[in-house]
Amino acid sequence: MLNLIAKETWNSRGRLSVEEMYDVVWSGCNATFDFCLLVVLAGWIAAVGLATNNAVMIVSSMLVSPLMGPILGFTFGTIVRDRALFMRGMLSELVGLFVTFMVGFVAGESRAINNF
């Protein structure tokens, strides 16, 4: 029974090291062109879903949105006390938030103009 409890017998294959997790999180919280394009696409899908009162489209826009990467970035940066990772994730999240609000503003204005 003690052999099962001893750390030497644990099998650690299939587990990521902290460095590997750090690299994955770091690469996922970049505000690249692809990130911004997916945020714009998710914003338009959500706008169409709101305009047509379609809950499925609103949920699908959440699936398209890449905003989970920056959220993981600043959360993991907080946990491991890495200020650079925290700031990078927070900046990417703010960029995504700004782009989403601009898409919503443009979609709302274009719908308001079409109603006149």
Image (spheres, rainbow, N blue to C red):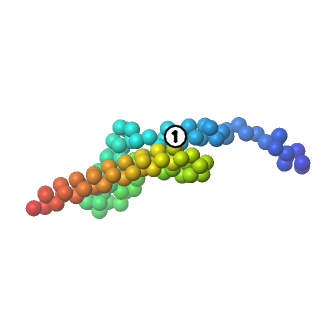
Front-most of residues 108 and 98: 98
- Whether residue 76 appears in this view of the structure is no
Read off the residue under disc 1: 26
- Check disc 1 and give the amino acid type: Trp
Q: Residue furthest right?
A: 2
Which quadrant of the view contains residue 24?
Answer: top right
Q: Residues within 10 Å of mark 1 (few under 14, many from 20)?
A: many
**Where residue 60 appears, x then y in whole percent?**
38, 52
Residue 36 versus residue 56 in the image, above or below: above
**Where residue 95 appears, x then y in whole percent?**
37, 48
Q: Residue furthest left?
A: 116
Left or right: residue 43 versus residue 70 is: left
Front-most of residues 26 and 1: 26
**Where residue 69 appears, x then y in whole percent?**
48, 46
The C terminus sits in image quarter: bottom left
Left or right: residue 59 versus residue 7 is: left
Q: Residue at x 40, y 41 (%)?
A: 31
Q: How many marks?
A: 1
**Where residue 96 appears, x then y in whole percent?**
37, 49
Q: Residue at x 25, y 56 (%)?
A: 105
Q: Secondary structure at mark 1?
A: helix
- Whether residue 27 appears in this view of the structure is yes
Left or right: residue 111 versus residue 80 is: left
Q: Residue at x 28, y 55 (%)?
A: 104
